[in-house]
Amino acid sequence: MAKTDPETPDLAEQIAQLRADMARIAETLVGLGQTFRTTLSDNLGALPSQNGQGPVEATLAQITDQARRNPAEALAVAAGLGLLLGLWVGRR
């Protein structure tokens, strides 16, 4: 008969907590993605040409500036996208 490890319930609780944490992270990334999409679509239509740049170049410069101002947010978005892409590719 197999012995019951006293740490097994703790491990199950930790796994449940990790799943809950990952769900909250996914929700946060979805919100960031929606905000980014809205901002990008608003800016693409509203940006005037700056220094001979078209709207795409101006938006790219704005995104780069935003990433420099908030590197943690940019890293979180990149990590989340990488995680989702990895999960998606891993299921194929």
Image (cartoon, rainbow, N blue to C red):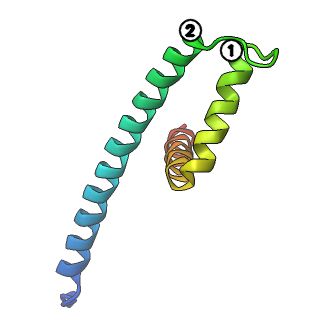
The image's mark for residue 45 is 2
Q: Are marks 2 and 1 in contact (CB under 8 Å)?
A: yes
Q: Which quarter shows the N terminus?
A: bottom left
* Of 30 and 10, the residue lying toward us: 30
Q: Residues within 10 Å of mark 1 (few under 14, many from 20)?
A: some
Image quarter for residue 2? bottom left
Residue 42 falls left or right of residue 1: right
Q: Which type of secondary structure does the marked residue at label 1 adopt?
A: helix
Residue at point 74% right, 22% down? 57
Vertical placement of 14 versus 20: above or below? below
* Left-right relation of 60 to 31: right
Q: Is residue 42 above or below residue 74?
A: above
Of the two numbered discs 2 and 1 on the same chain, state the one appearing first in sequence. Answer: 2
**Residue type pointed to by label 1:** Pro
Whether residue 24 is situated above or below residue 43 in the rendered picture: below
Q: Position of residue 22 (x, y in %)?
A: 34, 54
Q: Which residue is mark 1?
A: 55
Residue at the outermost front position: 51
Name the spot of residue 81 as percent of width and height, x first: 53, 42
* Image location (x, y in percent) of residue 32: 42, 38
Position in image of residue 49 (x %, y %): 72, 12
Q: Amino acid at mark 2?
A: Gly
Q: Quadrant of residue 33?
A: top left
Closer-to-camera residue (76/52): 52
User: Helix, strand, or loop for circle 2?
Assistant: helix
The residue at 68%/14% (across/down) is 55
- Quick one: label 2, few (<14), some, or many (20+) residues within 10 Å? few
The residue drawn where x is 36% and y is 36% is 31
The quadrant the C terminus occupies is: top right
